[in-house]
């Protein structure tokens, strides 16, 4: 299904040269992460919640809790805004004004449908789990009916989406270039530390290979070009 991606509401106005409305660019940024910020207007007030997500083709699967305020209206189809951001580096300039960050971001406007069928919900949870740690779903116990009742999954179909990327060095004014001040980029990278086993893991139970080799790229969660 083709996704409409350009509309007045979603068009990037500040630094439009950094914007992309290309489906491939948007998908790549979504696939490189697993935390989104989901925004709705509830009872006349804006609410934003960080939560897990996974892209499943032309939709986002968003994890939630029935206890969360924005997920209480089970039967309602809600208008939502979803954002995903990756910070790739601190851009340190000679002037305070020219400091920036290198980033990749996506903004999506769409509608959210609560997944209520247990089979569809289980399948969606599998997509989310494997997006966070590819291969994990095949190693764990499946959710029970009671656990499914305690979990919400929403399917977000988007009507508008845009990506925005900044990369590269600082952009100081020419008059500042001779100042005796270091300028450049401090890269920021997400890496995995050593696994910490739970206290109840038996000594003969080894961690699976997919966790030993986890990285943002291998999770399904995985340089791009610039104040």
Image (tube, helix red, strand yellow):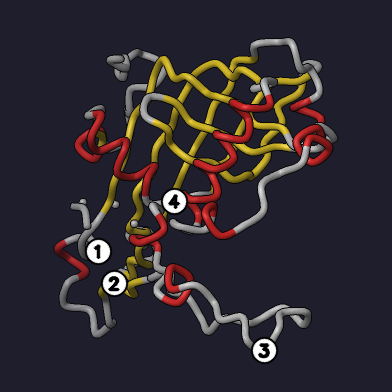
Is mark 2 in CB contact (under 8 Å) with mark 1? yes
Report the side of 201 relative to 29 (left or right): right
Is mark 1 in CB contact (under 8 Å) with mark 3? no
Identify the residue under disc 1: 170
> Is the residue 128 above or below the residue 60 in the image?
below
Report the side of 100 relative to 225 (left or right): right
Closer to the observer: label 4 or label 2? 4
Label annotation for residue 33? 4
Identify the residue under disc 2: 185
Whole-angstrom CA distance, mark 3 to mark 4, is 32 Å
Q: Where is residue 186 in the image (x, y as percent from the top left)?
A: 34, 75
Upstream in the sequence, badge 1 or badge 3?
1
Which residue is painted at 61% across and 17% down in the image?
Answer: 113
Which residue is painted at 78% across and 17% down in the image?
Answer: 73
Circle 4 — which element? loop
Closer to the observer: label 2 or label 1? 2
Identify the residue under disc 3: 203
Q: Where is residue 144 in the image (x, y as percent from the top left)?
A: 77, 41
Upstream in the sequence, badge 3 or badge 4?
4
Residue 172 image-quadrant placement: bottom left
Closer to the camera in the image, 105 or 114: 114
Upstream in the sequence, badge 2 or badge 1?
1
Is the N terminus in the top left, top right, bottom left or bottom right quadrant?
A: top left
Residue 99 image-quadrant placement: bottom left
Upstream in the sequence, badge 2 or badge 3?
2
Closer to the observer: label 1 or label 3? 3
Is mark 4 in CB contact (under 8 Å) with mark 1? no
Closer to the camera in the image, 33 or 143: 143
Closer to the observer: label 4 or label 1? 4
Upstream in the sequence, badge 4 or badge 1?
4
Whole-angstrom CA distance, mark 2 to mark 1, is 7 Å
Whole-angstrom CA distance, mark 1 to mark 3, is 51 Å
């Amino acid at each position: 299904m083709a996704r409409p991606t350009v509309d007045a509401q979603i068009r990037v106005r500040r630094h439009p040269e950094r914007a992309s409305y290309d489906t491939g660019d948007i998908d790549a940024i979504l696939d490189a992460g697993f935390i989104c910020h989901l925004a709705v207007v509830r009872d006349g007030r804006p609410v934003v919640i960080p939560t897990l997500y996974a892209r499943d083709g032309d939709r986002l699967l968003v994890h939630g809790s029935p206890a969360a305020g924005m997920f209480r209206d089970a039967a309602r189809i809600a208008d939502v805004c979803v954002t995903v951001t990756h910070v790739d580096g601190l851009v340190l300039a000679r002037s305070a004004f020219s400091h920036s960050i290198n980033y990749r971001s996506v903004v999506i406007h769409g509608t959210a449908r609560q997944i209520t069928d247990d089979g569809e919900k289980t399948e969606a949870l599998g997509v989310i789990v494997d997006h966070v740690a590819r291969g994990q779903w095949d190693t764990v116990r499946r959710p029970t009916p009671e656990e499914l009742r305690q979990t919400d999954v929403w399917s977000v179909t988007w009507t508008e989406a845009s990506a925005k990327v900044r990369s590269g060095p600082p952009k100081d004014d020419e008059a500042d270039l001779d100042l005796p001040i270091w300028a450049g980029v401090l890269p920021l990278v997400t890496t995995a530390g050593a696994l910490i086993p739970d206290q109840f893991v038996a000594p003969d139970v080894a961690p699976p290979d997919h966790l030993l080799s986890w990285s943002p790229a291998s999770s399904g969660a995985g340089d791009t070009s610039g104040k």
